[in-house]
Amino acid sequence: MSYQPNDRGYYGQFGGAFIPEMLYPNVEELREQYLTIMADPEFQREFQSLLRDYVGRPTPLFYAKRLSEKYNTKVYLKREDLCHTGAHKINNTVGQILLARRLGKKRIIAETGAGQHGVATATVCALMGMECIVYMGKIDTERQRPNVERMRLLGAEVRPVTSGSQTLKDATNEAIRDWISNPVDTHYIIGSVVGPHPYPDLVARLQSVISEEMRKQLLEKTGSELPNYVVACVGGGSNAAGAFYHFLDEPSVQLVAVEAAGHGIDSGHSAATSVLGKPGIIHGSRTLLMQDEHGQITEPYSLSAGLDYPGVGPLHAHLAVSGRARFISIDDEAALYAVAELSRLEGIIPALETAHALAALAQLGAGPDDVVVVNLSGRGDKDLETYLKYAEKLNSYASNSASN
Ligand SMILES: *Cc1c(COP(=O)(O)O)cnc(C)c1O
């Protein structure tokens, strides 16, 4: 079984490039060049130096003693929350902007939902002095004001999208339209392991630095490069792809992907794609997709904006169907509990997305000698407004988890 895409971008039955004719030259240029450019030592030198001095890599692998005691296993946290801008997303945008420059592009476009990818893109555009246009559903611009202001402060132009449901998928459509009109000078930075080939592979490779570092750090701390479990949350799947990448061909390592169950898998308000999804096409690739009996995409729900996506990347669809990864769904309540727990037990306030991965610790069945790595994809600052809204609940959870 291979977990790398074939030359047409297929992971098993998932992936490919389902794009309008007019987008073909843009995607084809990227497909022809990305591997050559990324293999160039000069590209690698610049990428590694920015990862080190700008992003702050390697991120620590932290042994979480009190959390380990609570779950009676050895829990290590991969601290992507300490990356510049507060999450793993910057690993990808730094890599893609270097790629864009080598392709001779002058202008960057991106789509964003909650605004986190927009901020990571605006950040690297400022760093490189490149024009940046971020498409964002008008409703999202109202819901995510602080991120809109961050992007503007960084010099990006945020274009509110008023078509359709005025959310992420409409912003994506608008970005694609822009790219079709500007094929020569523009690069489209996609923020997760989704989209037409080669994006899922490109983004997975750029994020794979996470598991590359994990192996070295585990060897140092535990005497073995291989843990028993690697756990990560999945929206589109980029932080999980990065955390799994260098363990995909190590069958002794159990890969655990955690999706958002929202109000509950069967509630009609969820984003548990691996359970509810069927094969379909979204954003240019064939993958598992939440859809109704007419093939219309159903609206996903999660309290966490970053997991609120109706599909998963094609690699993850393949990992789910082949059984290589175990998929667990965590609802809003359990995620909030995990926010309070990590805050009180380890002094780390996680992002709401990340809290889903942490909540899966209770379901792993890991033993006292097992090594579990949880990818701590991001920090909780951006979710403070949500945490304030649930303050009473979080505080009662917190005193609970500390006394247990
Ligand atoms: C965006 C985001 C996610 C979800 O995106 P993936 O591509 O699935 O990683 C998860 N955690 C954090 C902190 C995020 O900002």
Image (cartoon, rainbow, N blue to C red):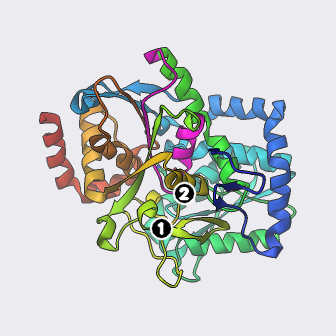
Q: Residue at x 27, y 55 (%)?
A: 388
User: Pointer 2: what residue?
Assistant: 317
User: Pointer 1: what residue?
Assistant: 277
Q: Residue at x 73, y 48 (%)?
A: 97
Position of residue 360 relative to residue 107, above or below, is above
Which quarter of the rendering shows the N terminus? top right
Mark 2 touching mark 1, by CB under 8 A?
yes
Point out which mark residue 353 bears. Answer: none
Reading the chain from its start, which is encountered first: label 2 or label 1? Answer: 1
Regarding residue 252, the answer to whether it shows in the image is yes
From the viewer's perspective, tell me whether residue 222 is left or right of residue 158: left
From the viewer's perspective, tell me whether residue 222 is left or right of residue 209: left
Residue 390: % across, % down: 23, 57
In-front residue for pair 358/116: 358
Which quarter of the rendering shows the C terminus? top left
Q: Give the residues drawn in magenta, as a range.
A: 221-246
Label 2 and label 1: CA atoms lie apart by: 9 Å
Helix, strand or loop status at disc 2: helix
Magenta stretch: residue 203 in it?
Answer: no
In-front residue for pair 159/369: 369
Residue 281: % across, % down: 62, 71
Query: Which amino acid, by three-letter code, is at mark 2?
Result: Ala
Q: Residue at x 56, y 45 (%)?
A: 241
In-front residue for pair 296/120: 296
Q: Quadrant of residue 49?
A: top right
Query: Which amino acid, by three-letter code, is at mark 1?
Result: Gly
Q: Residue at x 52, y 34 (%)?
A: 251
Helix, strand or loop status at disc 1: loop
Position of residue 103 relative to residue 247, above or below, is below
Position of residue 185 relative to residue 377, above or below, is below
